Amino acid sequence: MNVKWDYEIANHPDSQGNWIIWKKGSIENFKNGDIIPYYGIFDGKIICEATAVLNPRKVQNCEGLVGADTVYLSAFRTVEEYRGKGYFSSLLKFMLADLKKRGYVRATLGVEPSEKDNKSMYEHFGFVDYIKSAKEEYPDGTVIDVDYYGKQL
């Protein structure tokens, strides 16, 4: 987990402060059982990732997004050279199946309206139930628009 976060910090020089805060929070949330991180590994290297957030207090705009039987998915990332090759799709399929085995019946996620490719991918995986739109704030104060969608597992 540390290796992946250190990679992200090094590769985002313009927003390292955010990434350092996210790393600290992610490790703390994992230790407290508030998240489940999932990693796609190829040749010993983490090439993609996603996180399942289990605790409503760890999700902005949490109402309707996370609860006893609903999990919020976030932190979708794939190393650029591995994009478009199906690795993240495989990880997401595994993640959704694992969460269903753990007793979750619904998954939700958020996407910026301007990220058309991401929205299209999420729709492909069944995230078509519109929940709401809201704003999220990064640690540095940047505010983004987010549309939230869900699906049954």
Image: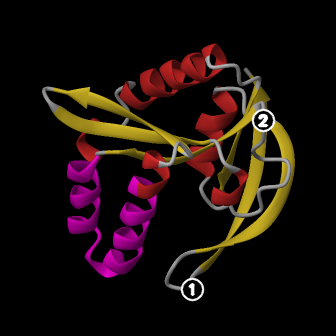
Write down the residue under mark 1: 141
Seen at 77% across and 37% down, the residue is 150
- Asked where in the image residue 119 lies, by quadrant, the reply is top right
Give the camera-side residue of 69 and 130.
69
- Residue 20 rendering spot, x and y as whole percentages: 34, 71
- Can residue 72 be found in the magenta stretch? no
The magenta stretch is 1-27
Label 1's element?
Answer: loop
Task: Identify the main secondary structure in magenta.
Answer: helix
Seen at 39% across and 54% down, the residue is 27
Q: Is residue 40 left or right of residue 115?
A: left
Give the camera-side residue of 15 and 119.
15
Q: Which of marks 2 and 1 is nearer the N terminus?
A: 2
- Asked where in the image residue 45 lies, by quadrant, the reply is top left
Task: Locate the C terminus by quadrant.
Answer: top right
- Residue 149 rendering spot, x and y as whole percentages: 77, 43
Seen at 55% across and 18% down, the residue is 98
Write down the residue under mark 2: 68
Q: What residue type is labelled 1?
A: Gly
Q: In this view, does 40 lie to the left or right of 25?
A: left
- Residue 135 rendering spot, x and y as whole percentages: 74, 71
Q: What residue type is labelled 2?
A: Ala
The answer to whether any part of residue 82 appears in the image is yes
Seen at 34% across and 27% down, the residue is 85
- The answer to whether residue 29 is above or below residue 100 is below
- The answer to whether residue 10 is above or below residue 100 is below
Give the camera-side residue of 116 and 133.
133
- The answer to whether residue 106 is above or below residue 73 is above
Given this view, does label 2 or label 1 mark the residue nearer the observer? 2
Q: In this view, does 63 lie to the left or right of 137?
A: right
